[in-house]
């Protein structure tokens, strides 16, 4: 099953499918099966919520399956697609995701990451 998940994540990373389409594909191969979710996440979490709010009022709200969030490259690329290299949060996304993955592995749930830039940009990561 991991091979199929990786293929779907690569499709998202390459822009061949969007996140809702990827979720449909993952659902079709059984990623959202309760038993599989327990193996993927010790806490039993099903979704990782990533919220980015810019000081200019732009918002990005993603709900990713735990399996998709575990792919460091794919999850980071999804968020960075909405940020620009000059944005205050751009360089903090990767470290925030690494920290959130470590917390997920330890069984943590709820709001895990809350980063605010000096400009007022915010990044929130929670696990439900």
Image: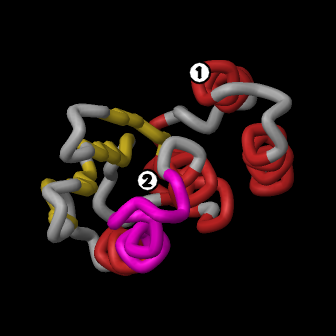
- 75 above or below 103? above
Residue 84 seen = yes
- Label 2: element kind: helix
Q: Is residue 121 left or right of residue 81?
A: left
Quickly name the residue at label 2.
38
Quarter residue 87 falls in: bottom left
- 83 above or below 70? above
Residues 128 and 118: in front is 118
Color theme of the render:
secondary structure
Q: Is residue 118 left or right of residue 46?
A: left
Identify the residue at horizontal 35%, vertical 79% (top origin). Answer: 99
- 70 above or below 32? below
Residue 105 seen = no
Quickly name the residue at label 1.
20
Q: Does the magenta portion include 12? A: no
Residues 28 and 116: in front is 116
Mark 1 Cα-neighbour bin, 10 Å: few <14, some 14–19, many ≥20: few
Q: Alpha carbon of mark 2 to alpha carbon of mark 1: how far?
A: 22 Å
Q: Is residue 109 left or right of residue 83?
A: left
Q: Which residues fall within the magenta stretch?
A: 84-97
| Residue 39 screen position, x and y as percent | 51, 59
Rendered image: mark on residue 51: none
Mark in the foreground, 2 or 1: 1
- Label 1: element kind: helix
Which callout, 2 or 1, points at the residue further toward the start of the chain? 1
Quarter residue 75 falls in: bottom right
């Amino acid at each position: 099953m991991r091979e199929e998940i990786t293929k779907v994540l690569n499709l998202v990373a390459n822009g061949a499918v969007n996140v809702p389409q990827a979720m449909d594909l993952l659902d079709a191969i059984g990623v959202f099966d309760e038993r599989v979710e327990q193996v993927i996440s010790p806490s039993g979490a099903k979704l990782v919520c990533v919220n980015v709010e810019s000081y200019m009022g732009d918002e990005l709200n993603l709900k990713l399956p735990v399996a998709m969030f575990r792919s460091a490259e794919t999850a980071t690329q999804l968020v960075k697609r909405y940020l620009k290299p000059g944005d205050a949060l751009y360089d903090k996304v990767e470290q925030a995701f690494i920290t959130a993955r470590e917390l997920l592995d330890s069984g943590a749930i709820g709001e895990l990451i809350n980063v605010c830039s000096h400009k007022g940009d915010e990044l929130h990561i929670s696990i439900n």
